[in-house]
Amino acid sequence: MVVRMFVFGALVSFPIMIIQRGLLLWLGESPFVFAFIISSLIEEGLKWFVVYHIIYNHTNFDEPYDGIVYAAATSLGFATLENVLYALLQPVSFGSLMMRALLPVSGHALFGIIMGYYLGKAKFSANPHRKRRLILFSLLQPLFWHGLYDYIMMVLETTWMFLIVPLMIYLWIKGLRKIQRANSYSPLRLVRREEEVKL
């Protein structure tokens, strides 16, 4: 199922590119509009759509941590194909490819972790109001961080590193904490511990 979500994430790249191209022609290239609508809203929105409609109600989604696994797999599928197409369609240096591997790819993974964390919490929340709020957070949080990342890259053409590096460090810390938290909520942890004690 993880591999399947990775493939779905890669496949969703094609409708994303078509929609983005249309919006670019319609809305223009304003940094804010491009970062938060053309890039972030479309990419995170369609990735969220795939995760929510394919895996959220699936029987394999049986613990909060699964939200992170499936959302990150979907995001990495998208990031992989996006970067392969980028390398094939544009003449770029090896250094540029390495930079994209370190920043945009890890960024997509981190946005997926944030998305999956809130979906995992929503899935197992007994409170309907809280469930709806968490589902909304699962879309808005990655949308905001993705948009902020793109906006910084577009506006600060030469000094972006001074803000992007601290932002990525913050997102890595935030992502790792969410992984630990989601894992601590797992009802299967006690089962695993009991099995380890028996062994």
Image (cartoon, grey):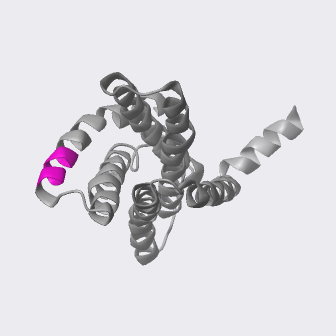
Q: Residue furthest bottom?
A: 129
Is 198 included in the stretch rendered in magenta? Answer: no
- How far from the left and from the top, in percent, is residue 71? 46, 46
Looking at the picture, tell me which residue is in the foreground, 24 or 116: 24
Residue at 22 percent of width and 48 percent of height = 20
Give the vertical position of 166 relative to 113 (above or below).
below
Identify the residue at image location x=13%, y=48%: 22
Q: Residue placed at 30% from the left, 25% from the top?
A: 89
Start-end of magenta stretch: 19-25
Q: Is residue 38 above or below residue 100?
A: below
Q: Is residue 62 visible?
A: no
Percent from the top left, x then y, of residue 29? 23, 57
Along the viewing direction, whichever of 39 and 180 lies nearer the viewer: 39
In front here: 155 or 171? 155
Count of numbered tags: 0
Quadrant housing the C terminus: top right
Residue 28 position by quadrant: bottom left
Q: Main secondary structure of the magenta part?
A: helix
Can you name the residue that lies furthest to the front here?
158
Against 75, is 128 above or below?
A: below
